[in-house]
């Protein structure tokens, strides 16, 4: 009896079933940082500045370590499609090992962070607070990376709902702990930015424990015996996760650093331009989380098809993922063009003296961000598809070249040399991310796993 014919509608449903909960989980994770920023803004501006600097350092380290967690997703997807339970267990365990080892190795950077923050010319009143914050957040890196590994493990097995709801619960727990520890409520001392860092530890530990209990006890997952003889090393699996993971981490850091460098360029134009840029980036980052969810879905679907040796299924999953991301980008573009100014205004107090100027600047950036959506969506989805076929090293070089060989120089040229201002700098971003998307898509569709 012939196998049932695949339909595009079924592929689309598969992308949405995986991608929407993952996107929701990414958005909830994003909200953890937003709630810290808002609540510290209510507490004290110096503590807020310390958290902004500290969070930038923490996020850079977390992003690099995330490479090993992201390597787990395609490896587990491929192994599970091949019904190789041992390989699922081996790669996930060693992903946990490498993530924990990474957190341990980089912790001295957190402990001595005050030295290099001072060398970078950060305000003297901010440096001690930022160092205190980072010394605590360095501890939080360990459970945060464990959470990332377990989320990717579950996503690869199609278990996306539990990660979504645990992350949403983590946002509310973070708000409650911040209220207690930042402001000194319920008899606790007022800790400010240190309180936000301590809250982050407990939130990440609680999330890691919740995920670990689910992974160990949920029906259908016990067969993998994930934590049985957890202490035994598997050097072959460590090598596999390492080889796939470190290029992912480098590519992620290259993109993160590009946005940091762009903020520095915009800062040279003035305070109002930087404020408009910051708000526009925040809005774009939230939308990027949706594309990242679809990218993760593409990794899983392509990884499963690879495990089954089904090239038609691999192509179909890729097409459905790209279609979904493009549709979302088009809707977002319309919203940005029609309501960009109103979106910028939501982030500003009605009493802000420079409100109208910032909205005018921000509305122009939102027009550029409309183009940005297609470029950013294309590159992150292409990167996800390539991870699905376990191709990460060449994509790392493509991304680094596109971001820093094209995007940053173009932004500098358009924005500062040709005096196009912040919109010119953002056009550089569009070019860099667009180049990355085009080259990465070309590599995926011309690759042996797809073309044969």
Image (cartoon, rainbow, N blue to C red):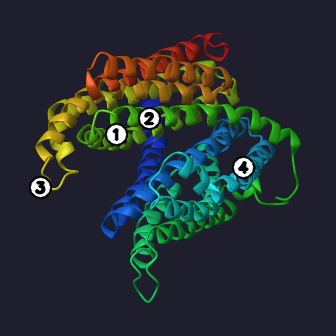
- In this orientation, which residue lies closer to the viewer: 269 or 3? 269
Give the Cα separation between the discs numbered 1 and 4.
Answer: 29 Å
Q: Position of residue 352 (x, y in %)?
A: 14, 53
Give the Cα separation between the discs numbered 4 and 2.
Answer: 24 Å
Give the residue displayed 42% in from the left and 35% down from the top.
291
Q: Secondary structure at mark 1?
A: helix
Mark 3 in CB contact with mark 1 (< 8 angstroms): no
In primary-sequence order, the first of circles 4 and 2 is 4
Give the Cα separation between the discs numbered 2 and 3.
Answer: 28 Å
Task: Note whether residue 159 is visible.
Answer: no
Using residue 262 as the reference point, say whether residue 318 is left or right of it.
right
Give the Cα separation between the discs numbered 2 and 1.
Answer: 9 Å
Which mark is on residue 327?
Answer: none
Q: Position of residue 181 (x, y in %)?
A: 45, 76
In primary-sequence order, the first of circles 1 and 4 is 4
Q: Is residue 409 above or below residue 251?
A: above
Which mark is on residue 102?
Answer: 4
Q: Which residue is mark 3?
A: 350
- In this orientation, which residue lies closer to the viewer: 410 or 391? 410
Q: Quadrant of residue 375?
A: top left
In primary-sequence order, the first of circles 2 and 3 is 2
In primary-sequence order, the first of circles 3 and 1 is 1
Using residue 262 as the reference point, say whether residue 218 is left or right of it.
right
Q: Which residue is mark 1?
A: 281
Quadrant where the C terminus is found in the figure: top right
- In this orientation, which residue lies closer to the viewer: 331 or 343? 343
Which mark is on residue 259?
Answer: 2
Give the Cα separation between the discs numbered 3 and 1.
Answer: 21 Å
Mark 4 in CB contact with mark 3 (< 8 angstroms): no
């Amino acid at each position: 009896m012939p196998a049932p014919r695949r339909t595009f509608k079924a592929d689309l449903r598969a992308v949405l079933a995986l991608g929407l909960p993952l996107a929701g989980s990414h958005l909830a994770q994003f909200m953890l940082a937003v709630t810290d920023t808002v609540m510290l803004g209510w507490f004290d501006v110096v503590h807020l500045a310390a958290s902004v600097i500290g969070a930038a350092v923490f996020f850079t380290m977390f992003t690099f370590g995330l490479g090993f967690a992201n390597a787990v997703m395609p490896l587990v997807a491929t192994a599970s499609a091949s019904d190789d339970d041992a390989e699922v267990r081996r790669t996930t365990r060693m992903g946990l090992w490498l993530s924990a080892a990474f957190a341990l190795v980089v912790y001295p950077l957190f402990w001595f962070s005050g030295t290099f923050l001072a060398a970078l010319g950060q305000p003297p009143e901010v440096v001690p607070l930022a160092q205190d914050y980072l010394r605590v957040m360095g501890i939080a890196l360990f459970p945060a990376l464990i959470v990332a590994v377990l989320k990717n493990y579950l996503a690869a097995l199609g278990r996306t709902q539990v990660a979504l709801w645990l992350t949403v619960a983590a946002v509310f727990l973070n708000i409650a702990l911040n209220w207690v520890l930042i402001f000194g409520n319920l008899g606790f001392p007022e800790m400010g930015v240190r309180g936000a860092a301590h809250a982050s530890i407990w939130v990440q530990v609680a999330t890691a424990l919740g995920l670990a209990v689910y992974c160990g006890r949920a029906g259908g997952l016990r067969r993998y015996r994930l934590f049985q003889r957890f202490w035994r090393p598997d050097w072959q699996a460590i090598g596999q996760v390492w080889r796939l993971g470190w290029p992912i981490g480098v590519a992620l850091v290259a993109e993160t650093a590009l946005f940091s460098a762009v903020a520095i360029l915009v800062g040279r134009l003035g305070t109002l331009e930087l404020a408009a840029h910051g708000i526009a980036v925040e809005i774009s980052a939230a939308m990027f989380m949706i594309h990242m969810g679809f990218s993760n879905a593409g990794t899983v679907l392509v990884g499963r098809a690879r495990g089954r040796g089904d090239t038609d299924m691999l192509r179909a999953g890729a097409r459905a993922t790209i279609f979904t991301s493009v549709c979302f980008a088009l809707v977002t573009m319309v919203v940005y063009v029609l309501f960009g100014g109103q979106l910028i205004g939501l982030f500003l107090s009605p009493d802000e003296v420079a409100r109208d100027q910032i909205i005018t600047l921000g509305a122009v950036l939102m027009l550029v961000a409309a183009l940005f959506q297609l470029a950013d969506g294309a590159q992150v989805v292409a990167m996800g598809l390539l991870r699905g076929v376990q191709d990460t090293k060449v994509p790392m070089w493509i991304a680094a070249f596109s971001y820093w060989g094209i995007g940053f120089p173009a932004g500098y040229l358009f924005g500062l040399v040709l005096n196009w201002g912040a919109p010119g700098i953002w056009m550089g971003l569009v070019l860099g991310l667009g180049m990355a998307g085009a080259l990465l898509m070309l590599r995926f569709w011309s690759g042996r796993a797809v073309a044969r």
